[in-house]
Amino acid sequence: MCGIVGLFIKNPALEAELGLHLSNMLVEMTERGPDSAGIAVYDGGATEGEVRITVLSTDPDYSWEQFKKEVREVFGESSKIEMNSSHAVLTLQAEARTVQGWLHHNHPELYMTSSGTNITIFKEMGLPVDVISRFGIEGMRGSHALGHTRMATESAVTTSASHPFSTGVDLCLVHNGSMSNHNRLRRRLQYHGVEFQTENDTEVAAGYLTWRLQEGDTLDEALERGFDELDGFYTFAVGTHDGFAVVKDPIGAKPAILAESDDWVAMASEFRAIATLPGVESAKIWEPEPARVYSWFRN
Amino acid sequence: MSEIDLDKSEIRDLNATLHSVDGKKGEKSFKVVNPNGKHNIAVGVDGQLDITIEGHAGHYVGGMNKHANITVTGNAGAGLAENIMSGVVRVKGNSSQYTGATGRGGLIVVEGDAAARCGISMKGVDIVVGGNVGHMCAFLGQSGNIVVCGDAGDAFGDSIFELNLFVQGEVKSLGTDCEEKEMDAEKLAILTGLLERSEIKADPNKFKVYGPGRNLYNFKIDNAVL
């Protein structure tokens, strides 16, 4: 069991409240997974020519000052490095791949939670309420966000095995369920050049989507193909640079509720998370059908 | 009527209150407000009570119900009226997965749609759905009746024992050993009675009825993989 939530803002006036509403939704899902929590926020932070990468260290005494110095030496003095608890958000004038390669070779002790122009991911062990407070999620603004609260079944309770998982630029995925064919699929995806940082099953699903999108599939096509190739129980909520999607596997054992109002689209493992949103009384509320892709995109 | 506000009261306190009365003397009628998707509302009630839940309820609402008449004015989550024994549980909106699972008696009415596995392993309950049902409806059901006024999803009536499954709309696919039956007078009377009791308007003559082929009662050596 895990709890997943997603919020996609349609009315730009509500963007300032994204973090607040997502936080309320995630806290409501605490009983579905008290092991760890994570949040992906899309806020359009980086500008043209910039990349934004988020890294985390599990060492509380990590020497961030030394790291910052190195980043500025390599990527220039204009590099922005914002610390947020155990995470550092880097906004650099560089290609995502260059920064990833540099981190991989020079700082293998750091775990990269996200890369892209729009996405930032924060994750930690502990209760959602504590993780939210630690990173100041309630004050964050943006266009869409995903959250996950984890009850581990397939791999260890660690910060790096917490969701959301991001394996591609601005792509992330949260998962309630468990994958059955992740070991074999991981090897296949590695052959196609997808890189993984953990042994976690959900990271493989994220990697699969990354690969399909690289191959030219649209998000909907990639998820449709996933019904045949991703074996297991899942409800996924997926974020991309400008999109938000929800799917349930064909057997559809894992719960999910969708709701849409004039101002937002929301998904959650259970309705009680959606009940926290403003205007829910007049929203359309429904249960997604198994093996059907639901997606929304920013204009 | 007694009103219980779930913004102010805990579910356990609500259920303890409902368990403390039998409906014969004392308070008989209860209104529950601000359910907001909370789980286990009005579970294990064993009295002739009228309970109205105003809004959307979470998982297992009305579970194990005996005697009570429970109405949810919004939607209900997974496991609505699971293992119901008697009484009536009505949802004016939609219900999630495994509505009425293992139900042994009583009546469940979902005025909207019921999701996957509605009536799974049912053992005597009657279920009337005003809209559609999802896949694997009635899977492994042993006795009772299901009425679907809309369409039924894949593997409808898979591996059932002795059920009557009435459908007005389309059936996407029938499950193993489920087949169409003749709508005889006895079955038509059951259907007509259920539509009346559930207060759902539909013409019984427009329904088809499905039931077990009874080919699964005995082991067949031809089905074994040797």
Image (tube, grey):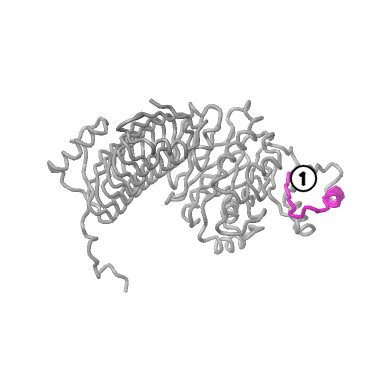
- Image location of residue A24, percent across then percent down: 60, 36
- Image location of residue B53, percent across then percent down: 41, 31
Residues in magenta?
A: A51-73
Please indicate whether residue B83 sits to the left or right of residue A176 in the image. left
Relative vertical location of residue A79 with respect to residue A177 in this rendering, above or below: above
Amino acid at circle 1 = Leu
The image quadrant that residue A191 belongs to is: bottom right
* Residue at x 55%, y 44% (from the top left corner): A4
Most extreme residue toward the left is: B185
* Residue at x 64%, y 43% (from the top left corner): A40
Q: In front: B3, or A279?
A: B3
Relative vertical location of residue A284 with respect to residue A102 in this rendering, above or below: above
Residue A299 in sight here: no
Q: In front: A247, or A242?
A: A247
Report which residue position mark 1 lands on: A90
Q: In front: B156, or B23?
A: B23
Residue A41 in sight here: yes
Q: Chain of mark 1?
A: A
- Image location of residue B129, percent across then percent down: 31, 38
- Image location of residue B220, percent across then percent down: 24, 67
Please indicate whether residue B98 sits to the left or right of residue A193 in the image. left
Q: Is residue A65 magenta?
A: yes
Please indicate whether residue A259 sits to the left or right of residue A204 in the image. left
Most extreme residue toward the front is: B25
